[in-house]
Amino acid sequence: MEEETAWDGIDVAPLRQLGSDSLIQVLGSLTCPKTLLIDPTLAGPLGKICDVNALRQHGVEKMFWLEYADATNPRPIHAPTRQLLYLCRPETRWMETLAAHYEANTRVQNESDAHSFAIAFVPYRTEPCLQYLRKRNLISQIQVYDLPLEFHVLSPDLLSLEETQAVRDIFYLKDQTILFRAGQALMTMQSTFGLFPRIIGKGDMANRLCDLLVRQRREQYASNQSSAALQSVSPQIEALIVLDRDVDLFTPLSTQLTYEGLIDEVIGVENGLVEVDASWIGSNSTSGSNRLTSSSDSAKRQVSLDESEDGLFTSIKDANFAVVGEKLHNIAKRINQGYQGRHGANTVDQLRAFVGKLGNLQSEHASLRLHTHIVEQLLCATNSERFHSVLEIQQNLTSGFQLSQQLSAIEELVYLQTPIMTVLRLACLACAVGVTIKAKWLENFKSLIVQTYGFQYLPLLIALEKLHWLNVTATSKSTRTTRFADLQRALRLVDDDVNEISPRDISYVFSGYAPLSIRLVQSICQHNESLRLGKTAPDPTRDAPKIAGWRNADGVIVHWPGALFDFVQEAEHGAISDDQVKTVVVFFVGGVTYAEIAALRLMSKQQRNRRFLVATTSIINGDSLLRQLN
């Protein structure tokens, strides 16, 4: 297996432990045996902080996945314990479900064997949910808890709030509840590691999060002035960079070409879990056997894409898909050579040594089997004519090549019954980069969408228009260029000389397009400056330059939509050695793609003493981004 650079940035294990402790505290509050009814969307997050055995040790005898029910479909709960505990997100549908269960059970049970109901809101209770319970006269009958699972640790360098509707709530509905939760999670980080010395970013909502974070820090310090973490800056964290998804829509609208990104595009990854055919997993495999998984189809299994369980995946997840097949072939040869070692084991010591290696070989073999099947499924998609047509349109759009031809090609995809999300991604991308999108074409396109796919997508079209993602391009008689074209040249967003095998630049994640969001991070950190100017690649043994923020930023960046901010937190400064590895936390408001994560991981490898920790509201791709609005 190829060696991967071990993560040596800040240790986020304390954040995972906080989540585990919170769950144990809630379970401990109900001392009697209990049955859990779990929101299926919490399968991944809960699986990261506990397993089935841990739940049983704390009195859980049975678990069910919550299914929606209301007053018209009351279904009593047949549980082996009197105590019922609902673990769910603060959504009205789960309040309706709980009320239906409560009323149905009250009618069919005697007081002597009636169930006791409790609910734990993840991460916190909300007033609409409490109002619903009051309206149904249930608030006094149900024990209410908060289960503050804030950041879910998906990997040592990746934290997510798993707020899958963040774009809809923040940008479309203008609901800032998720921003408040993000502020609370970042405050927990500061309480654990110390204050962020600087908070830098771009975007209107990112700026609001910065203001909220600063205010929360002052409020917490006023109520707890003895907290050492809130009085001094972190000796490990160099800065917090906050980026607004609205600043860079081009990246999620494009098709990711890293292995993990393509799995998300084609198969789908939720909470670090991917659902695959059960036959792809060997009968002796333990992957996911002791985890909370919400798959009910016996022909399907959910497996965890977790580097602690699957080292092979770790070695290929950030690679461009074009080189994954060869990597798997080399791994297969090495595993085969390992098995052949049994023929040379002639002594007892040699046999003992081979048997000691056998477990790892079998585990790698099972992992190789799984990923070979996944690659085969991905190849079915990537080898199709449709996939290549979509990729060509995307690359032509970001390069500014003959926009009118690309618009005609998008219409042709509609006639070919291409999935609607794919078509809308291309249309939104065209509107974002185009210079001649006219009202007549856009109206004809929307009519074509409704006629081809149905009226049920009309609300989505209205939402995209309201967000200005699908709209007429503003033109100017004095210039033939758009601001995106200026930005593309200034930040070298298109790389015609990309190296997918041994990448030196982040553009490898899209085979030629460098994510705008990550170029902004590079500008802030003065990272890869020589490469962006067409010189040699940065030296991974070189110390990282000091963070520049927006000082001397290109005028195109300054005038790009979205507020710029650079805030220095006033606090005591501890001594930080130049040799010490420093971590830059990059938080994405509205979600991040696996391709952007891979790009930041490449940057972590390119400098000796700076690492990038990704934090986000959720992991997204273009389809999930648009589905939020449907």
Image (cartoon, rainbow, N blue to C red):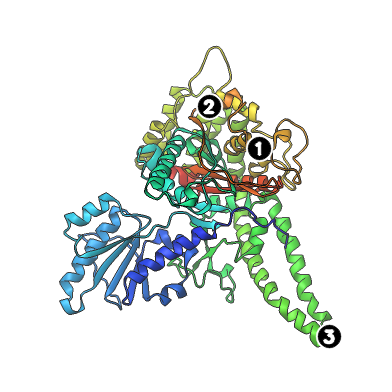
Return the residue nearer the eye: 185 or 51.
185
The image shows residue 25 at horizontal and vertical percentages of: 38, 67
Task: Tell me which label, 1 or 2, sits earlier in the chain.
Answer: 1
Q: Can see residue 418?
A: no
Residue at x 24%, y 54% (from the top left corner): 130
Return the residue nearer the eye: 44 or 8.
8
- Which image quadrant for residue 84? bottom left
Q: Which residue is mark 3?
A: 346
Task: Tell me which label, 3 or 1, sits earlier in the chain.
Answer: 3
The image shows residue 209 at horizontal and vertical percentages of: 44, 39
With respect to residue 51, does 133 lie above or below? above
Circles 1, 2 touching at the beta carbon (< 8 Å): no
Numbered label attached to residue 560: 2
- Which image quadrant for residue 399? top right
For the residues carrying marks 3 and 1, which lies nearer the camera in this image?
A: 1
Q: Which residue is mark 1?
A: 546
Q: Can see residue 5?
A: yes
For the residues carrying marks 2 and 3, which lies nearer the camera in this image?
A: 2
With respect to residue 589, does 484 lie above or below? above
Is label 2 in a helix, a strand or a loop? loop
Is label 3 in a helix, a strand or a loop? loop
Q: CA distance from mark 2 to mark 3?
A: 70 Å
**Outermost residue, bottom side:** 348
Residue type for callout 3 = Asn
Q: Quadrant of the N terminus?
A: bottom right
Residue at x 41%, y 35% (from the top left corner): 464
Residue at x 49%, y 38% (from the top left corner): 245
Q: CA distance from mark 1 to mark 2?
A: 24 Å
The image shows residue 606 at horizontal and vertical percentages of: 71, 45
Q: CA distance from mark 3 to mark 1?
A: 58 Å
